[in-house]
């Protein structure tokens, strides 16, 4: 999920110099339900298709009808490029169960004129909860790792289980699933501790790696995704 649930990020690297984005204009366009609203702030660019963004936004609104985006200026990158902090939240009701979603993203957008035509995602995650209360869960994953690096993937239930049975699963999300905002098939297993604790390995080539998590607890279900940038240079770990 990107542009908190819409954009699929490209790796950081050489790109057109971005102009300072307008958070207010982008927020207004994202929250405008008109099919043409995104055309006011986006135009096609290399690897960047506004029509795909609109299709994904429409699909996301079908799942969470009350979606609301918020956009604010973020901390500039080390090379001076401005960034945006984008968040989106929404909910849906299925029978007696209410699902609540929140996603967050830090992104640098690129433009040669008055519309954005490219972007770099620096940080991205999403969380969907069900149940009568928000199960306190912390997803512990780095924002960036080196190519081929082994790193920890931990999903921690922050409160004592008090005898509750916990089941969960984690899997990598394929690029095709990212384009469709789809989750991989996850096989639940009983968890002996208070969460999921794994060591995983980054790809050998720069790019990104996205993980999907599913936790089932008597208080509800939690699904989460987290994007990890994969870089070849240590200097790119903290852009």
Image: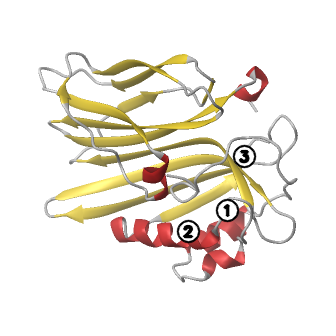
Assess whether mark 1 and mark 2 are in contact (beta carbons under 8 angstroms).
Answer: no
Q: Residue 215 at what x, y percent from top left?
A: 26, 35
Given residues 92 and 108, the one toward you in this image is 108
In the rendered structure, the answer to whether residue 50 lies left or right of residue 130 reads right
Q: Quadrant of residue 182?
A: bottom left
Residue at position x 43%, y 59% in the image: 180
Label 1 secondary element: loop
- In the rendered structure, which disc, 1 or 3, sits on the residue that comes first in sequence? 1
Separation of disc 2 and disc 1 at Cα?
9 Å
Give neighbour class at mark 1: few <14, some 14-19, many 20+ (Cα, 10 Å).
some
State the residue at coordinates (19%, 27%). 189
**Spatial distance from mark 3 to mark 2, Cα to Cα?**
25 Å
Closest to the camera, between mark 1 and mark 3, is 1
Which residue has dot 2 on it? 52
Is residue 230 placed above or below 37 in the rendered structure?
above
Q: Tell me what residue is drawn at x 84 percent, y 57 percent.
A: 20
Q: In this view, does 33 lie above or below 233?
A: below
Distance between mark 1 and mark 3 Cα atoms: 22 Å
Mark 2 lies on a secondary structure that is helix
Residue with the mark numbered 1: 48
């Amino acid at each position: 999920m990107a542009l908190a649930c819409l954009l699929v990020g490209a790796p950081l690297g050489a790109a057109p110099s971005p102009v300072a984005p307008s958070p207010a204009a982008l927020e207004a366009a994202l929250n405008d339900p008109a099919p043409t609203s995104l055309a006011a702030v986006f135009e096609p660019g290399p690897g960047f298709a506004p029509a795909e963004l609109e299709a994904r936004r429409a699909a996301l609104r079908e799942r969470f009808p009350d979606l609301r985006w918020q956009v604010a200026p973020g901390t500039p990158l080390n090379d001076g490029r401005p960034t945006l902090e984008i968040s989106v939240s929404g909910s849906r009701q299925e029978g007696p169960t209410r699902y609540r979603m929140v996603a967050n993203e830090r992104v640098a957008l690129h433009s040669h004129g008055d519309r954005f035509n490219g972007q770099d995602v620096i940080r991205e995650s999403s969380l969907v909860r069900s149940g009568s209360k928000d199960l306190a869960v912390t997803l512990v994953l780095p924002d960036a790792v080196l190519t081929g690096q082994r790193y920890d993937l931990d999903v921690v239930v922050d409160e004592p289980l008090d005898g509750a049975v916990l089941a969960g699963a984690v899997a990598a999300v394929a690029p095709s699933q990212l384009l469709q905002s789809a989750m991989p098939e996850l096989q639940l297993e009983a968890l002996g501790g208070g969460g999921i604790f794994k060591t995983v390995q980054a790809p050998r080539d720069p790019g990104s790696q996205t993980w999907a998590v599913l936790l089932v607890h008597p208080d509800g279900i939690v699904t989460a995704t987290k994007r990890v940038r994969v870089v070849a240079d240590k200097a790119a770990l903290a852009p």
